[in-house]
């Protein structure tokens, strides 16, 4: 327990699926969690759920394909939660299509 106490973890794709699980586990282990995703509602809900357990957390809208947004979010996370030595990248991917796309 508390293996990452005092650390800040920024989890991209953190609102759902594997990213959500990573956020939950890291919070349980004592990290401050920066949840970053394009799925705003689930991300905000998860931040609220984790805060209710006593975790320090926040949600940031982040599209990892936008370099300027990545820089801005990382800077804001550092300002709010502290330097983030721990990153987890778990972006979602769209479902396969029935035909090739260009």
Image (tube, rainbow, N blue to C red):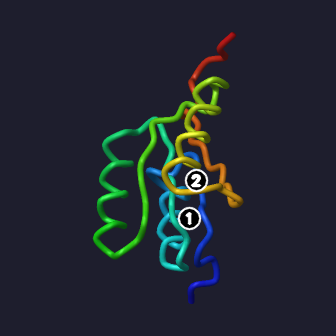
Residue found at the far top of this picture: 102
Q: Say if 59 sits above or below 85 in the image.
A: above
In whole angstroms, how far apart are the C-alphas of marks 1 and 2? 8 Å
Observer-nearest residue: 28 or 22?
28
Observer-nearest residue: 92 or 48?
48
Dot 2: element: strand
Q: Quadrant of residue 82?
A: bottom right
Residue at 56% over, 41% down: 92
Marks 1 and 2: CB-CB under 8 Å? yes
The crowding category of the residue bearing disc 2, from other C-alpha atoms within 10 Å (few below 14, some 14 to 19, many at least 20), is: many
Observer-nearest residue: 75 or 4?
75
* Residue that label 1 marks: 22
Residue found at the far bottom of this picture: 1
State which quarter of the image contains the N terminus.
Answer: bottom right
Residue at 59% over, 74% down: 6
**Can you tell which mark lies on residue 36?**
none
**Can you tell which mark lies on residue 11?**
2
């Amino acid at each position: 327990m508390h293996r990452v106490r005092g650390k800040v973890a920024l989890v991209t794709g953190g609102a759902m699926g594997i990213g959500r699980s990573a956020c939950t586990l890291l919070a349980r282990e004592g990290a401050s969690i920066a949840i970053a995703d394009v799925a705003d509602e689930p991300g905000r809900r998860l931040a609220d759920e984790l805060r209710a357990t006593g975790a320090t957390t926040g949600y940031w809208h982040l599209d990892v394909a936008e370099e300027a947004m990545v820089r801005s979010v990382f800077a804001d996370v550092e300002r709010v939660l502290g330097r983030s030595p721990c990153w987890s990248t778990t972006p979602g991917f769209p479902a396969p299509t029935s035909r090739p796309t260009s």
